[in-house]
Image (tube, helix red, strand yellow):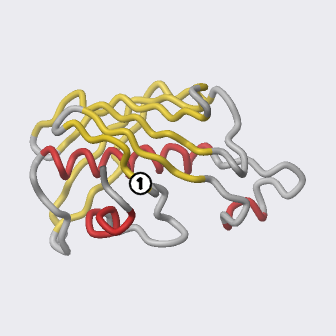
Amino acid sequence: MMDIYKILKQLPHRYPFLLVDRVLALDKGKSIRALKNVTINEPFFQGHFPHRPVMPGVLMLEALAQAAALLAFDAIDTTPNEDSVYYFAGMDGVRFKRPVEPGDQLILEVELVRMKAGVFKFKARALVDDELAVEAELTCAVRKIA
């Protein structure tokens, strides 16, 4: 389990872009289960959409990528530093299955499929009340900053 204070030490993201509130389970080098509490106070709801607030799909994918980063850093026993950055490198097979609305709790499930030379491949999905909201295969990379 990882609370917000440990997450803040691992991820460089900050408000309004930190999209992981808690890690519920972490199986080293294999998988992570985390959560994002979705509240009406999220800044994106002001414009997406004022008459029917829905969490943007790209932000659901970003939340999954942030959970994947936590899994990757734990898998290689490292903490990100100012000399490197963790990039979103690709996504495949993205499918949105249901809207995510204020009051929902987005459960982020990510499985590490492969890692080689700083490139990580993940199978990811997010659920609300055990119902699939989004699924995707994610590719992320750790790179040195020049």
Figure quadrant of residue 131: top right
Residue farthest to the right, as pictured:
51
Amino acid carrying mark 1 in the image: Arg
Q: Quadrant of residue 50?
A: bottom right
Query: Badge 1, how many Cα within 10 Å: few under 14, some, many 20+?
Result: many
Question: Which quarter of the figure has residue 4?
Answer: bottom left
| Horizontal and vertical percent position of residue 52 | 85, 49
Quadrant containing the C terminus is bottom left
Question: Is 98 above or below relative to 43?
Answer: above
Left-right relation of 52 to 77:
right
Identify which residue is drawn at 50% across, 39% down.
107
Q: Position of residue 119 (x, y in %)?
A: 19, 42
Tag count: 1
Q: Residue at x 66, y 63 (%)?
A: 42
Residue pointed to by mark 1: 22
- Which residue is at a point 45% across and 40% down the rendered structure image? 108
At horizontal 26% and vertical 63% (from top left) the residue drawn is: 10
Specify whether 87 is left or right of 134.
left
User: Closest to the observer: 15 or 139?
Assistant: 15
The image shows residue 98, relative to residue 105, as above or below, that is: above
Q: Observer-nearest residue: 68 or 1?
A: 1
Secondary structure state at the residue bearing disc 1: strand
- Say whether residue 94 is left or right of residue 103: left
Where in the figure is residue 99, as x and y percent of width and height? 70, 37
Q: Which residue in the rendered view is the most extreme toward the bottom?
A: 82
Question: Is 97 positioned to the left or the right of 29 in the image?
Answer: right
Q: Position of residue 60 (x, y in %)?
A: 54, 45
